[in-house]
Amino acid sequence: MRISAFLLGALCASQAAAQRPEPPPVRYPDLPRAAADAAGFVPAGWAIVATRRGDLNGDGAADLVLLLQMRDRANVLAIPLGDRTERWDTNPHMLALAFAAPRGGFRLAASNRGLFLRPVVPWDGSEPLGEDTIRIERGTLLVHFGYLRGWAGYRFRWQGGAMRLIGYDDGGASGGCVSTISINYLTGRARWEKGLISSDRGRVVWRGLRRGDRPTLDRIDLETFRPEETIAGPPLLCPEPGR
């Protein structure tokens, strides 16, 4: 009997999860309020994973976005897997955004660690965070995540003295159902679609958003923030087979 690479990977991950040690607790450092360059925002024991430059506050100067990761050997755990041992890197990530200062250097404008949750199981299928995680497009900051069966993207813009969430998109498959969500916080509207994997037709609805403050970059924590919960009305269900 032939076992697919995907199934084999899932079995290995399940075996490793059953034997995994708990990641040690970490303490996030405070970032400098200002620095001459990107290196000046990197705390001791951390490293830059990705850097982006572009104007984010509309002053015509190139601002700075950094994706940082802690580099502590104590957070790289050994996981027994059959007759070998694999490494599980649980070092956390953090995002820093700094605006170009008129007289040179940069000043910290926002930071976030809640977007980057530490993995709870080894090799959960998520894409490694790196150069493709952050982008600057037309004055907005995009943060992208790839998962085992889907993806998610957050779009932020500097408004009212803060980096505010203006858009959210995700897509994925689970239990034979494909779902996509696109939320526009500027218009207060969301497009939600669900359909069966076995069909090329889906159910699409347009809905408004619930009332409430629009999240800012520094306040978003994925332990508690669920973008789909901002969509008004009941959850959209997948069509039943044969309908």
Image (cartoon, rainbow, N blue to C red):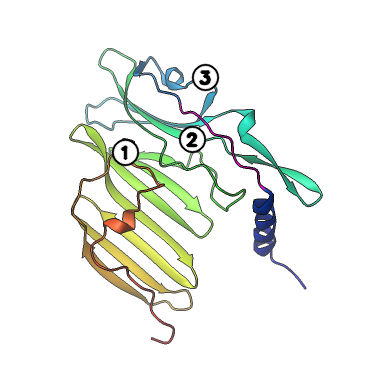
Residue 223 falls left or right of residue 123 = left
Q: Which residues are magenta?
A: 20-28
Q: Is residue 48 left or right of residue 79?
A: left
Whole-angstrom CA distance, mark 2 to mark 1, is: 16 Å
Q: Quadrant of the N terminus?
A: bottom right
Q: Which mark is residue 93?
A: 2
Instruction: Look at discs 2 and 1 and give the one toward the viewer.
Output: 1
* Quarter location, residue 34: top left
Q: Quadrant of residue 170?
A: bottom left
21 within the magenta span: yes
Cα–Cα gap, marks 2 and 3? 14 Å
Which residue is label 3 attached to? Answer: 44
Amino acid carrying mark 2 in the image = His
Residue 229 picture location, percent across and down:
30, 58
Type of the residue with mark 3: Ala
Q: CA distance from mark 1 to mark 3?
A: 24 Å
Compare residues 146 and 62 and report the one nearer the observer: 146
Between 95 and 137, the residue placed more toward the observer is 95
